[in-house]
Image (cartoon, rainbow, N blue to C red):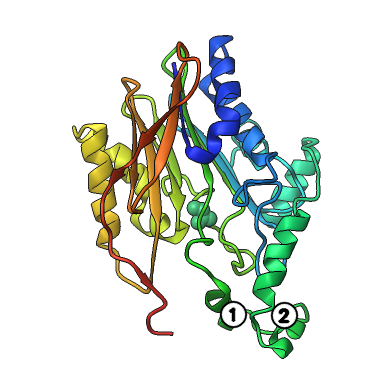
Amino acid sequence: MIVVASRNGRVGILAAVEVLRAGGSAVDAVEAGIRLVEDNPEEHSVGLGGLPNILGDVELDASIMRGSDRMAGAVGCLRGYRHPISVARQVMERLPHVLLVGAGAERFAAEIGADRGELLTEEARRMWAEKQALLPPEAAANLQDGADLAPWVAYLTDPVRSRGTVNFLAQDARGEICCGVSTSGWFNKYPGRLGDSPLIGAGGYADNRYGAAACTGLGEMAIRAGTARSLVLYMKMGMSVQEAGQQTMRDLDELGGNYLSDMNIIALDAQGTPAGFTNESEGKFIYMRAEMSEPQEVERTFTATRRRWAETL
Ligand code: GLY
């Protein structure tokens, strides 16, 4: 039994391992771990305290996938609910659908009695206001009144702050593997923007036969390269988890376009081997087996990928 997470999953990994120790499922473990990250106001890329879109609204994305039958649930652009991962799980368990977004996701969250809450903290509001102050005053004043937002999304975006997400992968005593992802997405994103996190195959993928993978980083890259699914498919084709992760990073390096930035992946093979990958100069992930007393922090394998940020603007 093992839980693997991005480093910001530290606040939840013990709870997730406890679930496994008590005989709970990988799905229960992933949900329990991510809920604690979603509750952490100091984590500005997930749940409460998450950084808002260009209009100052926090829009959350999340997904969960069960590896035995590849069932999955996801929500996107969810506002006003504390635990998008739990709403995503209920999409998987109660609906014939995989992904709900916006008003429909909120209606479903209300129907299932999900926890409501204000997500924009004072600290996140202050960070948003600092960025708004970079806009010409007339542009800032008009954004809320229907002015064009498109010219300002890239202008306000700091590629480092455009990323951030939490990933959890777990394997339980029965060999069930689950993958979960939750995020507030790209800071100052265009309202309605979905990243990779709610898209099965991009931000996360799980298949008991081969393993699982999940991403943090610039979601648009993982969407375009089908990153999480690619890594699992490379394992299906016979690569080790290390080889599969490095091949997946090379696929990202082959992307074109003007917005290429950070990407981090965590992975787990069917035998319970954890791995992590990054194109940043340093980056770590964590894992904890049921018999360990605390999580182990591990350096991710580095692969350089080309970077470009709005060169033609
Ligand atoms: N990886 C999270 C996002 O791009 O929204």
Position of 133 compared to 199: left or right? right
The residues bearing labels 1 and 2 have C-alpha atoms spaced at a distance of 9 Å
Which of the 4 image quarters holds residue 153?
A: bottom right
Identify which residue is drawn at 58% across, 16% down: 18
Across and down, in percent, residue 43 comes to 62, 46
Is the CB of mark 2 within 8 Å of ligand 1?
no
Q: Which mark identifies residue 152?
A: 1
| Label located before the other in sequence (1 or 2) | 2
Identify which residue is drawn at 53% across, 61% down: 161
Determine contact: label 1, label 2, CB under 8 Å.
Answer: yes
The correct choice, above or below, for 80 with respect to 27 in the image is: below
The quarter of the rendered structure image containing the N terminus is top left
Across and down, in percent, residue 155 comes to 54, 79
Which of the 4 image quarters holds residue 110?
A: top right
* Residue that label 2 marks: 143
Q: Nearer the viewer, residue 300 or 108?
A: 300
Q: Nearer the viewer, residue 236 or 130?
A: 130
Position of 92 compared to 130: left or right? left
Identify which residue is drawn at 28% across, 39% down: 233
Residue 292 in sight in this render? yes
Position of 45 compared to 200: left or right? right
The crowding category of the residue bearing disc 1, from other C-alpha atoms within 10 Å (few below 14, some 14 to 19, many at least 20), is: some
Q: Which amino acid is tagged 1?
A: Trp
The quarter of the rendered structure image containing the C terminus is bottom left
Q: Nearer the viewer, residue 304 or 223?
A: 304
The correct choice, above or below, for 195 with respect to 142 in the image is: above
Q: Nearer the viewer, residue 27 or 268?
A: 268
Q: Which amino acid is tagged 2?
A: Leu
The secondary element bearing badge 2 is classed as helix
Position of 110 compared to 72: left or right? right
The correct choice, above or below, for 155 with respect to 118 in the image is: below
